Image: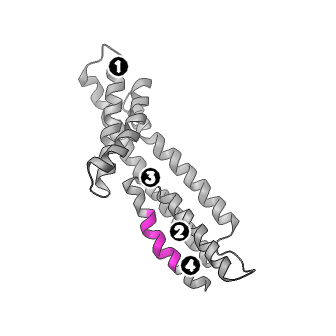
Amino acid sequence: MSIAAGILFVLIAIPLALVTVIGLPGTWLVIGLAALVDLIELSWRDGGEPIFGIWAFVIAILIAVVAEVVEFLAGAAGAKAGGASKRGTFGALLGGFVGGLAGTFIIPVPLIGTLIGAALGAAGGALLGEMSRGGVSLRETVRPATGAAAGRVAGTVLKLGFAIAILIQLSIAAFI
């Protein structure tokens, strides 16, 4: 039964990892699925061994935490790379979060809405943060805002990479 459970895990985990692109917590969904598979497998085989093991979960959780930090800070890093002040950097951080949530509902196109919302939110947040300093022209805010948008998109792509890494790591653990 363990091989069947492992195959089923992989087939369900692939789309769960991919939902990371639309702003859903794909990393945590894959980990949750692995825990569910272990619970079901253990309940069917009294006294049996778990499919994944504790170290597979520890590694997956550590990767997921790093992914969250990278995604959260990516828009701010992009704004900073574009020359943003502290206000612009904070604005990109806050704007990327708010924009991602808003984009999911305002642009109800899977994958696209959240990504566009997060990028525009990060750019808008950086722009507003820079403009709040006073004495800054709109032209001077373009580079930090563009950097924030690019950073936010890069953060989402990086988080997808982390989700795929967790998927691979847990898939290997399921068959070892």
Give above or below for 31 relative to 135.
Answer: below
Which image quarter: residue 76? top left
Residue 6 marker: 4
Instruction: Estimate how packed mark 3 is, as few (under 14), some (14 to 19) or many (20 or more) residues with alpha carbons within 10 Å.
Output: some
The Cα atoms of the two marked residues, 1 and 4, are separated by 53 Å
Q: Which mark is residue 132?
A: 1
Mark 2 and mark 1: Cα distance apart in space: 45 Å
Question: Most extreme residue toward the top, as rendered?
Answer: 135
| Residue 58, magenta (yes or no) | no
Residue name at image x 63 percent, y 73 percent: 38
Q: Secondary structure at mark 4?
A: helix
**Between residues 135 and 41, which one lies in front from this camera angle?**
41
Q: Which numbered disc, 1 or 4, marks the residue that appears first in the sequence?
A: 4
Q: Marks 2 and 4: which is nearer the front? A: 4
Residue 29 in sight from this viewpoint:
yes
Q: Which residue is mark 3?
A: 158
